[in-house]
Amino acid sequence: MKNRVLWLVIPAMAFGLGACKENKETKAPEVPTKVDEMVAKVTEAVAPVLPKVAGPKISPTERGAKLGFAKHLPQDTEVVLAFYNGSKTADRLKASKLWKLVESQMNGGGMSGPDEEMDNGAAAPGGAPAVEGDAEEPAPADGAEEHQAVEEAEAGAAEANPIMKDPAADDTAGADHAVDMPEPVGPAVLLGTEVTLAFGKTTGEQTGNLLTLNRRMSYFQMRGIAKAFAAAAKSGDMSSLSESFANSYGEQLMKDLAHDPESGMGLFDKMNVPPIYIAFRTKESDRAGAARLIASTVENVSMMGEMVEPVTFESGGFKFEGAKILGSKISAMLAEDREEMDKELDTATVDKMLAAIAKKNVVVASGTVGEYVVMFVGASTDDLKLAADADHSLVGSDALAFSDAYASKDLAALAYGKKEMLELLVKSAGGLADMTNGIRDGLAGADGLGNTRDLEALFGILSDREAALRKLATTEGMGLVAYFEDGLKMESFGGTDNTMLDWKTPNKLSHIGDADDVLFFANATVDANFDEKARAYAEAMVETAYAITMKVSEAPLTDEKAAEFKGMAKMFDEKFRPDLVALWDAYADGFNASLGHERAVVVDLNGAAPAIPGLPQPIVDKAKVPRIALVAPVIDRAKLSGSWEKMNTTLTSVLAKVSEMAGKEIPMQKPLSSEKNGNTTWFFPMPFFNDDFLPSVTVGDKWFAASSSKMQALDLIAKADKGGEGRTGFYLNLNFKALETYAKNTYKLYDENAAALNPNGEMSPADKKVIEESIAVLGDLDRLTIHTRRENSQLRSSVHFKTR
C-alpha cells in the first residue's frame, strides 16, 4: 500500500564486552584474582547475548584487516552489512553457463553493459578486462597521518598471518598498473571491492519508532473503516464506503495519529535520523574520482537552497564536508501555512509539531577514510564517530568474534547487529492484533450492525491467542558470514526463534531423502507447545471471520449485491457450517492428534508415466514423472482410522447437499485398498493409473505416507523402518544434479519421439538450441542445502549453494 512503505533493518546479533588486560607488575598479588572473578561474572552474564565462536579468536588488527571498514566503526554500532569481492563475484557469474545463456538471448549475443561496469569500466589491451584488486598499498588520506602506523601494522600482520590476507589480493596483485590510462569512475569502482553499510547508535530505537507509527496507522485505518461500514449499514447506503476506503490515509488519520498517546507528538518528538555510514573501498588510483562522485551526490542536497547550510568537520582525524538540512528553516517554512494546518489540527498540536521539527536537523556529508570513500547521514555532526584505532573500534570488541573461524575464507558478505535492537524490532513490529483491535473499537458503540459485543469478545480472544503465540519467541544476538567455498556458503548465528521447531528431538526421517534421484527433501519436527497455540490462534481467526460474515449478512442492506451475499451466507450457515465444523474436528482432534510432530517431504524423479491414450508407447514405457510424498510417524493408528471415518461421513453429507442443489446425484466414491507388510494403502480407482502413478494414503502402525505414488510411499516407509542417524532441526536439500539428469533424459526421449508427439511439425532448430542451453545451465550447479538447528543452545543455520 502506497505511503506505508517503512524501511526495516536486518535482524541483528549481539554486541559484547571489549577485552580486558591486566598489568601484573603494577598490581598486588590479590588484585588479579578479584579481576578474574569480576570478568568471570560479567562473562557469565553476557554469555547468552554473545554468539558462541568455534575455533580460536584473532586479534583486532587481524579482524580489521579481514573485515575492512568495520575497523573504523565505533563499538556502539548497531548494524553492519558488508559485501566483499564484488568484481570476483561478477567474474564468477559471467563465467557461468546461465550468464552465457542470457547473453546469447539478448542483443544478438552481446551484453556489453554489465561487463563494462563490473570490470571498472576499463579493458586491458586486446579486449581483456582489467582485474580489480587490493594489493596496492594505499596512501594515507588527508588528516589521517596518525593512522599510517596502524595500516602499516595491518599490512605487516597480513604478510605474517595468512588468515588476514584478502583472497582477492593474491589474484590481482599488480593489476593496478596493467593499464596506463586512468580508469573512468563509475559504479564498478565503488562496488567492485568492498561496500559497507553501517547504522550507529539509536538505529534500533528509531526503527522501533517507525514500526510503532506503522502499527498505529493500521489500527486507526481499520477503526475508521469499521465505523464507516457500520454507518453505511445503518443508512442502507454502501456508496459512502468506497470513499471511506479511499480516504483511509486522509485528514482524520492524521488527526488520530497526532492525538494518540502511542504515536502522537511524544513519539514524533523522539523520532530522528540514526547515524548511517556507507563506505566504498577503493584503489589509490580510483580514490580521488570516487570521492568526487560521492561528494557530487552529497551536493545535491544544496538544491534545497536556504534550507541547508554547508558543514565541515572532523572525526578520528578524517575530514568530512557536506550540508546540514536545518529543521528550523523547514519549521519556519511550514509555519507560513499555519492557517491551513490549524484547520486540520488544533493549535496546540501544531505548535508542538513545529517545535519538534525545528529541533531536527539532517547532516549529509562525505570524506575519505584511509582506503574508503564514505558517505555519512545523521542528525548531527557529533553522530559521526570513527574509532581512533582497531582496538577501540567494533573489531576490538567481541561483537564480530563469530567471524573469527572464517577469517581464512574468501569472504562474500558479513552481517552484524545488536541483540537489543533485534528484540526491539520484534516487539515494535506488532501483529494482526493492531488491525483487529481497530475493527473492535470501530464497531464498539456503533449500532449499524446491531449488538456487536460477541464480535468484540472474539476480537479479544484473537488478540490474546496471538499474544500467547508471540510470547513463545526468543531472541539472541544474530550475525552472518558468507564466503566462497565449493560455491557459496552462509553461516548464521542466533536471531529470533519463534519456537515453531523442536530443536532437541532427533528427526527419525532425516535419512529417507538420501537417494541420488531425490530432487527435493525437507524434514523437521514441530514443537508440540507451538503447534497447540498456533492451532488455537488459527481457530480464533476462522471463528472471528465467520462471525463478521454473519454479522454483515444481518445488516439492513437492500441492494442486489447485498441480497446475493445474504443468501449465500444463509445457505452456508444452514447447510454447510455443521459439516465443516465436524470436518475440522476430525482433522484437528483426530488426524493431527494421531500423528507425531515430525514431517518429511520427498520429491523424486523416478515415477512411471500413466498410460494416457494418445501418448506414444515409448513415452509410456520409458518416461519418468516426479513423485511427491509426505511422511509422518503414527502414534495412534486407531484414532487415525476413526478420524478418516468421520471425514468420510462428513464429506458424504456435503456431497449429498451439493447433489440436492445441483439437481443431480453425485455419489461419494468408495476407496479401494491393498495390504503389504502390515501397511494399508487407500486410493480411489481412476482410469490410466498404475502403482507408480497413484495418489494414495498408506498407513501402518508406525508410519503414515500421503503420496502421488503407491510404490514411493511403500519404499519410503521401508526406509523409515530401517532407521538412520537422526538430524535435529530443519533440513532442506535441493538436488540440481538429479534435475540435470532428468532433464537430459526427458529431452532425449522427447526428441526421439518428436514426430509422434508433434504430427504437425517438429520443433525448430533455434528452439532446440534454447532448450539444450537451458539444460546445460544445470551443469554448473550441484545442490542447495539448508540446515537450521541449535548448537550448544545457540540458534545456527548453514546454507550451502554448491556449484561444480
Image (cartoon, grey):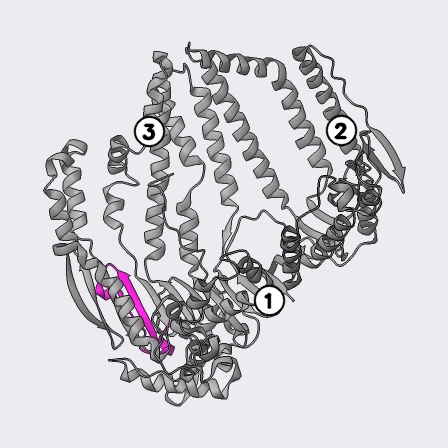
Mark 1, Cα crowd under 10 Å, few <14 / some 14-19 / many 20+, is some
Side of 666 where 674 appears, left or right = right
Q: Which residue is drawn at 33% across and 62% down?
A: 200
The amino acid pointed to by label 3 is Ala
Q: Position of residue 737 (x, y in %)?
A: 70, 59
Side of 755 where 1 appears, left or right = left
The amino acid pointed to by label 2 is Trp
The quarter of the image holding the N terminus is: top left
Q: Which numbered circle lies on residue 246?
A: 3
Q: Name the residue under label 2.
A: 644
Q: Which residue is drawn at 18% across and 56% down?
A: 303
Up the image or down, 495 lies above or below 639; here it is: below
Q: Is mark 1 on a helix, strand or loop?
A: strand
Q: Residue at x 39, y 46 (%)?
A: 428
Side of 38 where 141 appears, left or right = left
Q: Number of numbered discs present?
A: 3
Q: Is mark 3 on a helix, strand or loop?
A: helix
Q: Nearer the viewer, residue 189 or 400?
A: 189
Q: Quadrant of residue 560?
A: top left
Mark 3, Cα crowd under 10 Å, few <14 / some 14-19 / many 20+, is few
Mark 3 or mark 2: which is in front? 3
Q: How far apart are marks 3 and 2 (CA)?
A: 48 Å
Residue 420 located within the stretch drawn in magenta: no
Q: Mark 1 points at which residue?
A: 487
User: Along the polypeptide, which appears first: circle 1 or circle 3?
Assistant: 3
Tell me, yes or no, whether the two marked residues, 2 and 1, touch with CB atoms within 8 Å: no
User: Along the polypeptide, which appears first: circle 3 or circle 2?
Assistant: 3
Q: Which of 5 and 445 is in front in this view?
A: 5
